[in-house]
Amino acid sequence: MDVHVSAPWPHRLLDVPALRREGIHPAPFEQFVLKLHSRCNLLCTYCYVFNAADDSWRGRPPQVRQDVLERSAARIGEHVATHKLRRIRVELHGGEPLLGGVDAALKQVSCVREAVRAAAGTPCDVRVSVQTNGTLLTEDVVSVLAAADVRVGVSLDGGRADHNKRRVDHAGRPAWEAATRGIARLARHPEIYAGLLCTIDLDMDPVDVYDSLMEFGPQALDFLLPHANWEYPPPGKGPSMAGSAPYGEWLSRIFDRWFDSGRYRTRIRLFAEIIGLLYGFPSRAEAVGLSAVVAVLVETDGSIEQVDSLRTAYAHASSTGMTIFENSFDDVLEHPGVAARQLGVDGLGEDCRRCPVVRVCGGGNYVHRYRKGSGFLNRSIYCSDLELLIRHIAHKMGPVLGSDSLLPD
């Protein structure tokens, strides 16, 4: 059965062999997302793994198997050696990646580092991080992660309990207190404190959310647009409201607060990426820009997948049909869904190509472009929000270079 039948582009319409014949070659993977645990001790109401169109997690082992762990590490080492990579990122995800214990997490880290060291002919810097909900960050866990040089990012939707009403456990109880205790412990180890990840809630005052998160002393913040698309639009923005920009307005208020306060030592990823793009630098995130996406995911059963967030589109949308036992990561680079996200402007629809902010927006997150029947060759459900935010930032940054704006009208 063709699991991608509702997305003809790119899965049936993108001719990857033809791209290769034309001399368009893939960029190697540099970011490897490894699922340590497919279950979670929380059940956040907006979770794209457990509360979206795809429930494939139910058929997967709760915890990564030893053979999957070892084979994943070997495949990463193989990819590093093949492409002579000098630096890679390994991100440990879930579910909740620490649900199986910190020792299991470190076993994966050791396997990857050893495999890369054994396979690579030249030194490769392996940077490891774990993305957690923070509830399992005890003093011992944080100390062990610090000793292993594993950076830690925590998902939190604001610095107050009422900001986190959607982050609850399986009994509906708030996870706020346990999460903030974990963050407090993490903050005592700034060398591994990667930052906080916040999913936007329009019901919350953006400046209050920003100010309250800053009280935790993060080195970085990332504000995420809720994963949504034309079939499943985000809260406050249905298809008939495509021209409205509530998320762009929400983010613009935070940008003004951050920019006017001069607190630039705290990096806000989305803003930093947009500013860099306005000044002509390439993007390093899929949310904006036209850079090739170089991330790949391995599930607990060894399935090789595209990005997890694709699950919000349709069942098995992230599937490649490949596994680390039967396929190399080079094989995965030939998958239409992967190739499409490495095409830059050529992977966008006509509306996007004609847009004056396309080199900054880049069509937005690929996941947010999905529409049943056409697939991913559409503008983002957040198109108007992204344009508003980009123009707002360009207007604010223009005077720094002696210009009214960095973008055409």
Image (cartoon, rainbow, N blue to C red):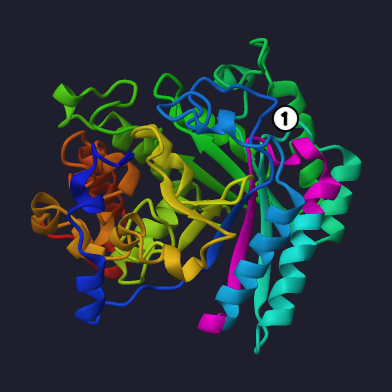
Q: Position of residue 68 (x, y in %)?
A: 68, 54
Q: Position of residue 90 (x, y in %)?
A: 63, 60
Viewer-nearest residue: 305 or 240? 305
Queried whether the magenta region covers residue 338, the answer comes back as no
The residue tagged 1 is 179
Q: Pick the quarter of the image with the C terminus.
A: bottom left
In the picture, measured across the screen, residue 320 lies left or right of residue 386, that is right
**Residue 404 shows in this picture:** no
Q: Which residues are magenta?
A: 82-106
Q: Residue at x 17, y 44 (%)?
A: 378
Residue furthest bottom in the image: 121
Q: Quadrant of residue 78?
A: bottom right
Helix, strand or loop at label 1? It is helix
The crowding category of the residue bearing disc 1, from other C-alpha atoms within 10 Å (few below 14, some 14 to 19, many at least 20), is many
Q: Position of residue 396 (x, y in %)?
A: 30, 53
Q: Total of numbered circles in the picture?
A: 1
Queried whether the magenta region covers residue 84, the answer comes back as yes
Viewer-nearest residue: 378 or 143? 378
Q: Position of residue 136 (x, y in %)?
A: 79, 34
